[in-house]
Amino acid sequence: MTRNGAILAIVGRRTCAVPCSRGLIMDQSILVAIARFPDRGHAIEELARTNEDFRLLCADLADAEAAAVRWEYSSLPVSAERSAEYRELARDLAAELAAMLDRHAQ
């Protein structure tokens, strides 16, 4: 733990301080989901702790967002098209993630 009570989380190969409501060590994909839905951070942490399918969906979202950024900065002729495709995939995955959160909240 750090001085301010944050938990150290592994993000890729880097370590960063991440405040966690219940002392979880969160991986990058969970942080991506929280960044997408900051008002639902607690629910994301809770569902990620207990639901492997949800964690896999978060990982898919993180991968799609990362791929969109990589293609955005690529110099290849297809870069804009590929980036748009991955951004659309990320939107679809985020909608699925939101639906899982909604079902869990009921």
Image (cartoon, rainbow, N blue to C red):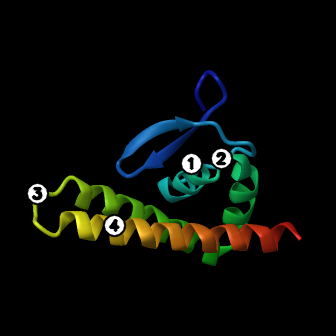
Q: Earlier in the sequence, mark 3 or mark 1?
A: 1
Eyeballing the image, is 19 above or below 35? above
Do the numbered discs 4 and 2 sit on residues whose CB atoms are within 8 Å? no
Picture coordinates of residue 75, whole percent (x, y)? 10, 57
User: Which quadrant holds residue 104?
Assistant: bottom right
Query: Is the residue under label 2 in contact with that under label 1 (CB below 8 Å)?
Result: yes
Q: What residue did someone put label 2 on?
A: 38
**Of residues 52 and 1, which is closer to you in this image?**
52
Q: Is the Cβ of the residue at disc 1 closer than 8 Å to that at disc 4? A: no
Q: Name the residue under label 4.
A: 84
Residue 2, given in percent of the width and then of the height, sits at: 58, 27
In this view, the mark in front (2 or 3): 3
Q: Quarter-wise, where is residue 58 in the image?
A: bottom right
Decide which of tag 4 and tag 2 comes sooner along the chain: 2
Which mark, by number, is residue 35?
A: 1
Q: Mark 3 points at which residue?
A: 75
**What SS does tag 3 mark?**
loop
Q: Earlier in the sequence, mark 1 or mark 4?
A: 1
Instruction: Give the residue type at disc 4.
Output: Ala
As shown in the figure, which amino acid type bears the numbered disc 1? Ala
Task: Find residue 83 and report its horizontal and vertical position in percent.
Answer: 30, 64
Asked whether the beta carbons under mark 3 and mark 1 sit within 8 Å of each other, the answer is no
